[in-house]
Image (spheres, rainbow, N blue to C red):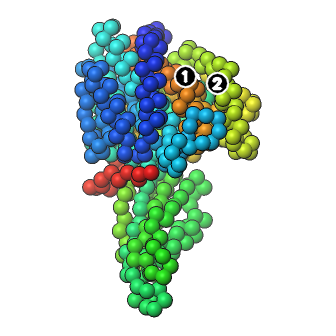
Amino acid sequence: MAKNWGPADWIDERRERFIDMSDDIWAHPQVALDETYACELQSEFLAKEGFDIKSNVGGMPTAFYAEWGSGSPIIGFLGEYDALPNLSQTATTAQEQVVAGGPGHGCGHNMLGTASLAAAVALKAWLEESGKPGTVRYYGCPAEETGAGKVFMARDGVFDDLDAAITWHPWASNTVSVTSSLAIDHIKFHFHGQTAHAAAHPEHGRSALDAVELMNVGVNYMREHVMEKARIHYVITNGGGQPNVVPDEAEVWYYVRAPERDQVDELVARIIRIANGAAMMTDTELTIHDHYGIHNMLPNQTLAGRMFEVLSELGPIDFNDEERAFGKAVAGGYPEGVRRAGIRGSGLPESAFDQPLLAEVMEPGDPGKVMSGSTDVSEVSWIAPTVEVHTTCHPAGVPGHSWGITATGGMSIGHKGMLHAAKAMAVTAAELHNDPDLLVRAQAEHRESMAGKTYKPPIPEGAVPPQPVLS
């Protein structure tokens, strides 16, 4: 393997530019489909770097892609930048919000988008210097946390001509993802009834809230008769106004997950029948909206193997004593049982409990495992060979989507993990140019994984992206 470390050196020489960008996005968190600050910041940066910008992709104002170069191979880097509600947090070792109830980057997407952008610009610089042909794309993908972004981008066809896609995610260890994920549907059920005075004239009322509650009861009985790995979650987003008024409007929001896309389709069909039954029982009307889904991940072992070689040669992250102390203090802010369960669930060694910042490179997990979460990166993996690297950006055992991840993502622990990921992605992309057979083998594996299936975005005909849920 004749790697060229030029892209990694290029990133090292400009590290402060990318640290500043990550911190800027961290300081201006915005939730899914409202990420105007990060979208504009990255678009303007890439335009100055010579990339052509395509905005409003998939009908989403905060989705864009940037392209430079021409010809093959076409390599895409996937970035994200949405924050999570109620996870505002200072870059300190104690739980402390910057803005009470405000959003925060509790999944590290301020770093995720920045590192992918850095890798794209580094690959451009390397191609210019080497004179090699090829096209570089960076995708600014909104709303990963609600699963909406990439599926609507995919429906627009913006990934269709990719030869390979590269991404990463902040993690508690340095490794490469080789596992699948759960497919998922998001769906909202809105019931419309008839309002009335709940005491004086209840006979005139038709309660939309009764319909929501009966639906939920039916789905909860259904849970006994679903596959073990299925997951069904819901929240009531509108339950009425006050008790003495029969609610004429009510809504419940469901997530439905399973290891395979067709399994989700079957579960959702059953849930829709239950919802229709609840409407019939309560003499209310049902409408379904914001219905969209994502696939299970198709990992590409060919690309993962090469990326792991690159990550191994990059070596461990050089965390200093101050950073290790910071990580240990953040980890100490969580109950011992929570951390130990998280470490076991992630397949990390028990020693991670006492050494929460894992600097060394770790072997990938079991390729046959299906992780418990879902990601819209899966949509791209059904279109082109896709690989994802993980680097240590927070302490082991700290739960995802929690204050500790926001804290370390705004200081040097996150910075070091982010830059490590950017270098791993950029060098792996250069390898696809240096070793054309690698791409041939990755694409052959992708065709085999598809097993003759054709990708179809799992959203209803005519569906539009949901509106942002502002914090």
Quadrant of the image occupied by residue 51? top left
* Residue 466 seen in render: yes
Three-letter amino acid code at disc 1?
Lys
Q: Which mark is residue 50?
A: none
State the CA–CA distance, disc 2 to disc 1. 10 Å
Check the image and name the residue furthest to the front: 99
Nearest the eye: 186 or 245: 245
Nearest the eye: 355 or 152: 355
Total of numbered circles in the picture? Answer: 2
First of labels 2, 1 by sequence position: 2
Q: Residue at x 55, y 55 (%)?
A: 231
Give the secondary structure at mark 1: helix
Q: Residue 384's x, y, as percent? A: 37, 33
- Residue identified by numbered label 1: 416
Three-letter amino acid code at disc 2?
Glu
**CB under 8 Å between discs 2 and 1:** yes
Q: Residue 109's x, y, as percent? A: 47, 36
- Residue identified by numbered label 2: 323
